[in-house]
Image: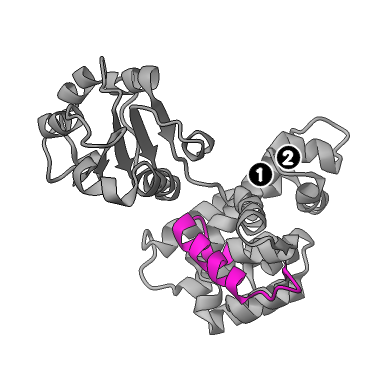
Amino acid sequence: MRDLREGRYAPVYVLMGEESYYIDKISGYIENNALSPEQRDFNMSIVFGSDVQPNQVVDMARRYPMMAERQVVIVKEAQNIKNWERIERYLEKPMQTTVLVICYKNGSIDGRKKILARAAAVGVVYESKKKREYELPAFIANYLKLNGRATIDNKAAQMIADHIGADLNRLTGELDKLILSLSDSDRRVTPEIVEERIGVSKDFNAFELRSAIVSRDVVKANRIINYFNSNPKAGSAYMLVPMLFSFFQNLLIAYYAPRPHTDDSVAKWLGLRGGWAAKDYITGMKNYTGVKVLQIISKIRETDAKTKGLDNPNTPVGELLRELIFFILH
């Protein structure tokens, strides 16, 4: 993006991966900025993989620009292209006056195909990976800082991450609305603001449930689970089970961190942003034995299967979640 903003365009971009947000961001920037508005009619070609043949893409890429420095060819939904041979041959000697952008979503091109090596030799190959759950609060804080000159506290960021999840297009859409709602005089995002403007309860949410489980606060955890059962939209099993699995999976790994177990050493071991992010794991190691954590992970996997209908003829999802929380805490 830095190169693009400075006007340095490569002759080819292969943008691929599970996370469409970054693919759209890069290809969208090229579409909107590589050519001036008056140049686009003759020098911009946007096609879809299901509607075009590889030889047609190559023919478009080999054209010369008309009254412009460059032309742009964007292939969207390129995962629908079956044969890459013609495009691979084109990349042996691509046109320097063409910017060819290949957007391959919902996966990545097989690394054994020649297109990746050839594209990397003459241009850019970028793999857009899904954000992991523990990376979302940092993404949220950075997005608010860069796009809204706003700050957010750790709890509020975790509340948003737990409520919306790792769909970055949806997440950034909610953050954009949140930015617009902030006053010029106060750019802080607090749990109260998240509760009011995104609709996440500051007391009954996944963050507070995890906090209660970490500290083995049985009363608080059950109060939150009862709230979720009465308000399914506030916290469904399909969001809570992966969150619990992620925490206990990391907790199991934390036991193997070099001793002494300090906030900073555990954070570094788990690849977290800083020592504050490891505090729950330090507390978790005090409240749960390694054997219990293994049993919990097994129970979470069993619950996950049952919520999806495997070996579960009629137990309601809410009851499965209540049973899982009881098993974890006792």
Q: Do the residues under discs 1 and 2 have CB atoms within 8 angstroms?
A: yes
Q: Is residue 102 above or below residue 180?
A: above
Tell me how far mark 1 sits from mark 2, CA to CA: 6 Å
Task: Depth check: give the residue in front, 95 or 245.
Answer: 95
Q: Amino acid at mark 2?
A: Ala
Q: Is residue 123 above or below residue 3?
A: above
Disc 2 target residue? 254
The location of residue 76, given as percent across then percent down, is 26, 45
Magenta residues (range): 162-189
Tell me, yes or no, if residue 285 can be seen here: no
The location of residue 195, given as percent across then percent down, is 65, 78
Q: Along the horizontal axis of the image, is 150 left or right of 121? A: right
Tell me, yes or no, if residue 244 can be seen here: yes
Is 109 covered by the magenta stretch? no
Task: Depth check: give the residue in front, 143 or 250.
Answer: 143
Q: Residue at x 54, y 60 (%)?
A: 241
Task: Depth check: give the residue in front, 184 or 266.
Answer: 184
Disc number placed over residue 250 in the picture, else none:
1
Secondary structure under badge 2?
helix
Q: Along the horizontal axis of the image, is 275 left or right of 12? A: right
Graded by Cα atoms within 10 Å as few (under 14), some (14 to 19) or many (20 or more), the crowding at tag 1 reads some
Quadrant in the picture for residue 329: bottom right
Q: Is residue 25 above or below residue 322?
A: above
